[in-house]
Image (cartoon, grey):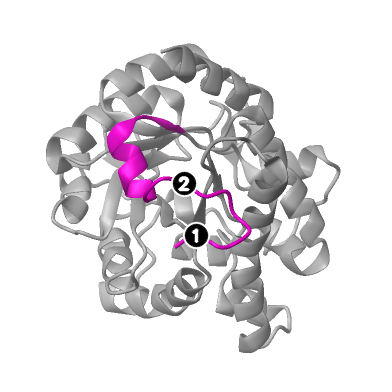
Amino acid sequence: MTSDCAPRSPGTLTDALSHGTLVLDGGLSNQLASAGHDLRDELWSARLLAEDPEAVTAAHLAYFAAGADVAITASYQATFEGFGKKGFDQDRTAELLALSVGLAREAARRADAGRPLWVAASVGPYGALLADGSEYRGRYGLSVAELERFHRPRAEVLAAAGPDALALETVPDADEARALVRSVRGLGVPAWLSYSVAGERTRAGQPLEEAFAVAADADEIIAVGVNCCAPADVPYAVEVAARVTGKPVVVYPNSGEEWDARARAWRGSPTCTAGQVGGWRRAGARLIGGCCRVGPPTVARIAATLREA
């Protein structure tokens, strides 16, 4: 599953999770914005796949340099429908989706880290296409079958590009999770399923026991967990995910600030610290990093804490 330009690893990402804890990167958009890129566009960071791919590679490289073992691609907001609105045809969109994996691989090659480095292709929720904060609410008014038809073509293209895993991430709704699990069947690439949660429920309001049960018997899903949530929401989610599924748990919360979708701005103060990750690891987390507003300095501290442990 790895490309010729990627550092070789013993076995697969699934094998690696059975032997230890891996460090995820942080928020890709955070690093791109810090480098001076204007992301005020419906395509968000995916726009740079077409306009400035070298910037995406540089952002991945910054996280590998900080100690991340896994890079998540810039395909979160990259969809056939979203690029279509901007005038890209299906062939060009497929090229850009595949490029997102290639850019992360190139960053891994340049990092020359002396350790296995991995690439997870981001498959964001339907709400990311709408670019109106719907990924924090769910309940789009679409059926599971309709959502599967939306996700499957993108998942197929990303899987064909050869990532180590698909990251089904920031999922607000158990119904969409069902669609995503169906959409990755038979693709030959493992995936993790990661919900966006609020307290003890998904953003759409389902109990986490019900939400994580969606993936319990899915062989394609190698890890389950949460991302793009408050750090305070992580401990309960880790406990429930591990208990309900028996799978490794993935966690990458936001900084602790809150996104104001109407004002398109972050509010509050950061609360995500490296001191929290030890407890998450003891509870079953095996993929640990950060999401929105978590940059390379925090990832470096998370990496150092986990490696000391």
Quarter of the view holding residue 117: top right
Tell me the number on the disc at residue 2: 1
Residue corresponding to mark 2: 9
- The C terminus appears in which quarter of the rendering? top left
- The N terminus appears in which quarter of the rendering? bottom left
Camera-nearest residue between 200 and 33: 33
Asked if residue 21 is among those painted magenta in the image, a careful observer would answer yes
User: Mark 2 falls on what kind of element?
Assistant: loop
Label 1 with label 2: CB-CB less than 8 Å: yes
Label 1 sits on what residue type?
A: Thr
Q: x, y (%) of residue 180?
A: 33, 65
Q: x, y (%) of residue 21?
A: 38, 30
Camera-nearest residue between 65 and 59: 65
User: Mark 1 falls on what kind of element?
Assistant: loop
Q: x, y (%) of residue 181?
A: 28, 64
Q: Return the disc, 1 or 2, that comes first in the chain's sequence.
A: 1
> Is residue 222 in view from this perspective?
yes
> Is residue 263 in view from this perspective?
no
**Vertical side of 116 occupied by 162: above or below:** below
Quarter of the view holding residue 26: top right
The span picked out in magenta is 1-22
Q: Count the marks.
A: 2
**Vertical side of 71 occupied by 271: above or below:** above
Residue name at image x 22 percent, y 28 percent:
239
